[in-house]
Image (cartoon, rainbow, N blue to C red):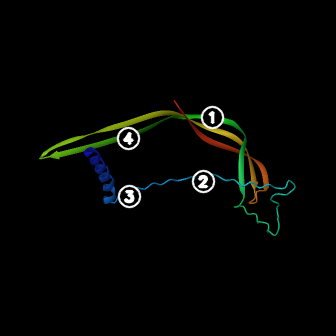
Amino acid sequence: MLKKSVITSLSASLLAIPILVGFTPSASAEINPQNSYEIEILDENAVLNPANFGIQDPKPLCATCNQYKSSIVSQSLVSRTYKGTVTLSSTSSVTGEVSFSYKGASIKIGGSKVYSSSRQFKDYTVVKDYRIRVKTYNPIGQLISDETVNRRITTLDRVPV
């Protein structure tokens, strides 16, 4: 009987301590809403997005409002010229020190470490001819122009040795 009352009073006092101190337990849960989709059935004979629908005024075309989409049609290598060998190096250092002193005696622990690395690369100048197809659309999304452009582009190619 004595053991049971001690255990009961002990557990009651443990539960009372957080309440006296001001601790208020709380729990929260978050539920993510499910994605919902709205399906609209359209008439097959309906015309979607006509140029001048209803009372809308036609939108003015401006060069800053146009959208451009491009894709590479073909590319061909014109030349690849060796420029030389390049060495890239990097160096970093880490230094740390901790000191303790007690009654006139001091202990210092620390050190430094230097890291360094270098790699060699061969540099090439690469010249390629590109045929690029550029499509221009107005703000409504209608195709304005479809043209193919020829460009010669020079790049630097770096190959590890």
Determine contact: label 3, label 4, CB under 8 Å.
no
C-alpha gap between disc 2 and disc 4:
49 Å
Q: Earlier in the sequence, mark 3 or mark 1?
A: 3
**Looking at the image, which is closer to me, 28 or 159?**
28
Which is more N-terminal, label 3 or label 2?
Answer: 3
Q: Secondary structure at mark 1?
A: strand
Q: Nearer the viewer, mark 2 or mark 3?
A: 3
The residue where tag 1 is placed is 80
Q: Which secondary structure, mark 2?
A: loop
Residue behind mark 3: 24
Q: What residue do we see at 77% from left, 55% from top?
A: 40
User: Within 10 angstroms of label 2, few (less than 14), some, or many (20 or more) residues?
Assistant: few
Residue lying at the far top in this picture: please name it. 161
In-front residue for pair 140/113:
140
Tell which circle, 3 or 4, labels the residue nearer the N-terminal end.
Answer: 3
Q: Earlier in the sequence, mark 2 or mark 1?
A: 2
Instruction: Give residue 57's position: percent from left, percent from top.
Output: 79, 69
Q: CA distance from mark 2 to mark 3?
A: 29 Å
Q: Amino acid at mark 2?
A: Pro
Point out the frontmost of discs 2 and 1: 2
Question: Residue visible at 34% across and 37% down?
Answer: 114
Q: Using the numbered discs, state the Cα–Cα distance from disc 3 to disc 1 in whole angstroms.
A: 73 Å
Q: Residue flagged by tag 3: what amino acid is it? A: Thr
Residue 46 left/right relative to 5: right
Q: Amino acid at mark 1?
A: Arg
Residue position for label 2: 33
- Cα distance in 3D space between marks 2 and 1: 57 Å
Kind of residue sitting beneath label 4: Ser
Rendered image: mark on residue 92: 4
**Residue extending furthest left?**
103
Decide: few, some or many residues near mark 3? Use Cα within 10 Å; few <14, some 14-19, many ≥20: few
